[in-house]
Amino acid sequence: MNRHHALGPKRVAGHTDPAFEEVKAVFEAGLANGDDLGGAVAVFVDGRAVVDLWGGIADRRTGRPWRRDTACPTFSCTKGVTATAALMVSQQYGRGTDEPVSAWWPEFAQHNKHETTLSDLMAHRAGLPVLERPVSVAQAADPAAMADLLAHQYPLWPPGAEHGYHALTFGWLVGEFVRRHTGMTVGEFTCRHLGDRLRIGASGAAVREAARISSPPPEQRVWSAENAPPIPDDTVTEMLAAFADPESLFIRASSNPVASYNDPEVLSAGWPAAGLVTTARDLATFYGDLIGGTLVAPGLLREAITERVRGRDRVLCLESAFGLGYMLPSQNFLVPEPAQRTAFGHPGAGGAVGLADVEHKVAFAFVPNLRRDWLAGDRRAYRLIAAVYDAL
């Protein structure tokens, strides 16, 4: 292994297998040119750590450096962990994912939701992507209350008929399956069965020592067709309109409750769709364990990463694709060609990505704290993943 140590805010620390030097070069370039403020990238291949790098600034206000064990909010990367918790519970209790939700959550059956299945919840087909009334950060910390609120809502489309990204409600819907069977929140279940370094509900020192999320200057946050990824112009136009409309499903699904991911109250709440605070190393280790067969049976994982939906997303407006909770390569999850057929995982708002590939035996995670958007030209994770596959 090639080892080196941080000598300044732009330098990188950690280790890299010589065959994966290009991954290090891409990561170093991101810090040097300002694409990144601080962050970490980790890669396992066939269970072996080939990249474990970190660098930059963890907190722009103080200049605190990013250290080996600096954790960071990862936004929707959380969904891959929550999906795995649900699969583990399904496996333990012999619950099929195509059973009606009402079999274990009777209250959910009201308002024409009686045929909704767990797979509908996990594949974003439930028709419940928004909370129909304003919810505070304090209220969102009560998973039972959030589940009850969703049980009383009417679906926006017949469950199973279409799909649309359940940006926040995914966690309380799928999390209720975990809670009803185990008596534990997703955060508690994760801590007990997946490790206490995957924090869905961080508090105390874990929050104080976490990286602080920053945003780039306004001119670097402009969404435009010029900077957009390779998707049709009319789709980009529709998306931009949705992002600008406070009544669009996209805004309603992603901004209730209104919250800052630097707020200790938010990070301690343990939102099971967006609350994961962890390191790149621990997120990549999780995906390595997942494809290694130590968390769920290989047959169940194959079922979970089999495509359940693909096409225009009612919330995101562009193409998305899902298995059982895991996102699959699509317009909303761009990966290089070698990864397109067999990779799965989940990106998070602002650039974080957790990814695995059973065929290539790859587990990957990138965790930054400078919140960029891929429609504004963010290719940080894509370039790192491409360098990984080039090295295989």
Image: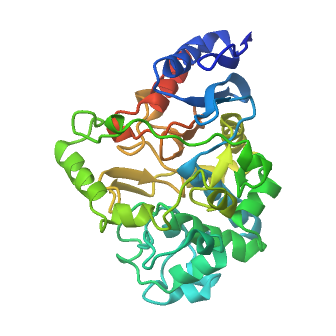
- Residue under the point 63% across and 68% down: 175
Task: Farthest residue to the right: give it.
Answer: 192
Vertical side of 135 occupied by 70: above or below: above
Res. 363 visible in picture: no
- Residue under the point 41% across and 75% down: 159
Task: Farthest residue to the front: give it.
Answer: 62
- The quadrant of the picture occupied by the N terminus is top right
Specify the quadrant of the image occupied by residue 246. bottom left
- The quadrant of the picture occupied by the C terminus is top right
Res. 301 visible in picture: yes
- Could you tell me residue 297's position as x and y percent? 71, 51
Q: Nearer the viewer, residue 212 or 329?
A: 212
Is 388 displayed left or right of 336 in the figure? right
- Could you tell me residue 181's position as x and y percent? 73, 74
Specify the quadrant of the image occupied by residue 287. top right
Is 224 displayed left or right of 27 in the figure? left
Is 51 displayed left or right of 304 in the figure? right
- Could you tell me residue 165's position as x and y percent? 42, 60
- Residue under the point 45% across and 74% down: 131
- Residue under the point 47% across and 23% down: 34
Vertical side of 364 occupied by 77: above or below: below
Q: Nearer the viewer, residue 250 or 388?
A: 250
